[in-house]
Amino acid sequence: VYGLTPHTPKQPIPYSHKQHAGDLKIPCLYCHAYARRSEIAGIPSLSKCNNCHSNLSVESEAIDNLNKHIEEGKPIEWMRVFETPDHIWFNHKRHILKNIACQKCHGPIETMEVTSRLVLHHMGFCLRCHQENGAPTDCATCHT
């Protein structure tokens, strides 16, 4: 149920945050560029993936699948891992501007071969963070 249970959906193409964000140290905001200027973090476009992958000579089934999507201009239908209920308003931009690390809400994502929702996003989790950081705690801050 939304962010209250661990969640590891099977993705159409295997994607390793460990390899990209961990080993290669690609910043979260390079791929999830909307996070710094919008409520949503967004999923990287195929052209964003192609920025790097067009210059790689790595052979794998996953990269072949990615290249096929790029050549056909066919978007990848990623399965959502992190989601909030409709009655909650969350704004990535506000949290990024306050220098809240992505890992605070998403866990050690840079270590994940397979992206999983391990941090459980319940009201107490958010409220505790707001209290620790001097952020507003009135109901209208998060509830629409």
Image: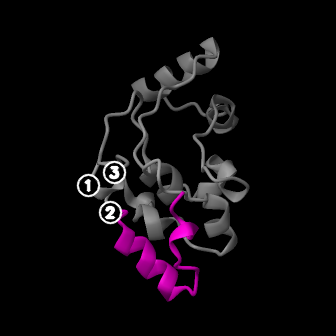
Q: Nearer the viewer, residue 144 or 69?
A: 144
Q: Residue at x 34, y 63 (%)?
A: 119
Q: Are marks 2 and 1 in contact (CB under 8 Å)?
A: yes
Q: CA distance from mark 3 to mark 2?
A: 11 Å
Q: Amino acid at mark 2?
A: Leu
- Residue drawn at 60 percent across, 50 percent down: 41
Pointer 3 or 1: first along the chain: 1
Counting labels gives 3
Q: Is residue 5 above or below residue 63?
A: below
19 within the magenta span: no
Q: Nearer the viewer, mark 3 or mark 2?
A: 2
Residue indicated by mark 3: 116
* Outermost left residue: 5
Residue 85 image position (x, y, % from top left): 42, 50
Q: In the picture, residue 70 is in which quadrant?
A: top right
What residue sits right under mark 1 in the picture? Answer: 5
Which-is-in-front pick, marks 3 and 1?
1
Q: Quadrant of the C terminus?
A: bottom right
**Three-letter code for the amino acid on which mark 3 is drawn:** Ser
Q: In which image quadrant can residue 48 be found?
A: top right
- Type of amino acid at the residue the image marks with label 1: Thr
Work out whether 18 lies above or below 56.
below
Labels 2 and 1: the sequence-earlier one: 1
- The residues colored magenta run 119-144
For the rendered model, the colour scheme is one colour
Q: Which residue is mark 2?
A: 120
* x then y, percent, for residue 60: 43, 27
What percent of the width, then of the height, locates residue 66?
52, 25
Q: Marks 2/1: CA distance?
A: 6 Å
